[in-house]
Image: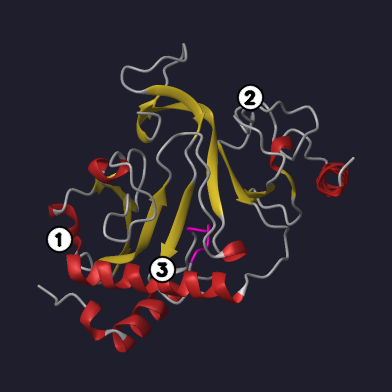
Amino acid sequence: MSSELAQAHARGVVRLLACLGLGLALGLAPLACSREASLGSVGGGQDESDRWARRFVPFEESWCGASEIPSAPQDAPHMVIWELSEYEPGTPPTPEQKAAGEAFLEACYRAALERGWYDFDAGLADGYRLLFQDRRHYVNDEYVLDGRILDPERPEFLMYYGTPRGKRLAGFMFYVNEPGERGPQFAGNDSLWHYHIWKRAKCLLHGLIAVGEADADGNCERGTVTHRSPEMLHVWLLDLPTGSFSTSMMISPAILGEAITKRDAERPETVTPAP
């Protein structure tokens, strides 16, 4: 066995042991990583032997092999979110990856300013609309289907949060181009992509844009029936405790208000004048 294969085998064993220990400790086998998951499963869909995974919702701290994600959608809860990484958990980003993350964040700030997206109405006028069964993700169908990835000038989603001053831009969300495509981790473990697995199948146009839920027979009037979303990445245009690329959408009103106030003070050009 070559040294490269030996190292890959060793990493796989470590991941598997971490998975099994986690499942036994918490008694969450139906939701935790599973040895029986197939590569063609709802959780995999491709060879994932070189990536790590962590269940983010409901949260599990430990990581395991991405190919060990359960092969069938869960009975509960209604949605599970998995984070993914091609880098070993705990590995800090390199200086080059840190610089790439900072540069990309600034490019997103600049694009939002130049396009006027800090103004909610400008975002709507640019073709963004509220995603099916959502409150904060506004999707641009053209940008989802344009074949580009991680383009700050054409983010697939804008994320607006309600505040006492109306809808305020919190950040972008980027998609991959194809349902089974991997998101590139340009900032190392700072830029974790994630995907959703739904208990009840959804209907996705082109396998990407949610437009409905499957009926009782598992059929869709529009789109493809699937239990799994494409991979996605958040970019927060706010200084949040969880970081600039955090998966979490849960922001308390107090933290959101403080972050917006800080951005308004440090970047006054992003403030939308009150009507």
Q: Which residue is mark 3?
A: 104
Give how far across and how far down residue 245 sits, in percent: 50, 64
Q: What secondary structure prevails in the magenta region? A: loop
Residue type beneath disc 2 = Gly
Q: Which residue is mark 1?
A: 122
Q: Is residue 192 left or right of residue 104?
A: right
Return the residue found at the far front.
Answer: 2
In this orientation, which residue lies closer to the viewer: 102 or 265? 102
Which corner quadrant of the image does residue 112 belong to?
Answer: bottom left
Spatial separation of the CA atoms under disc 1 and disc 3: 22 Å
Inspect the magenta stretch and tell me whether residue 247 lies in it.
yes
Q: Is residue 240 above or below residue 18?
A: below
Give how far across and how far down residue 141 sits, in percent: 26, 40
Sequence-wise, the earlier of marks 1 and 3 is 3
Sequence-wise, the earlier of marks 3 and 2 is 2
Spatial separation of the CA atoms under disc 1 and disc 2: 42 Å
Residue type beneath disc 3 = Phe
Q: Which residue is mark 2?
A: 40
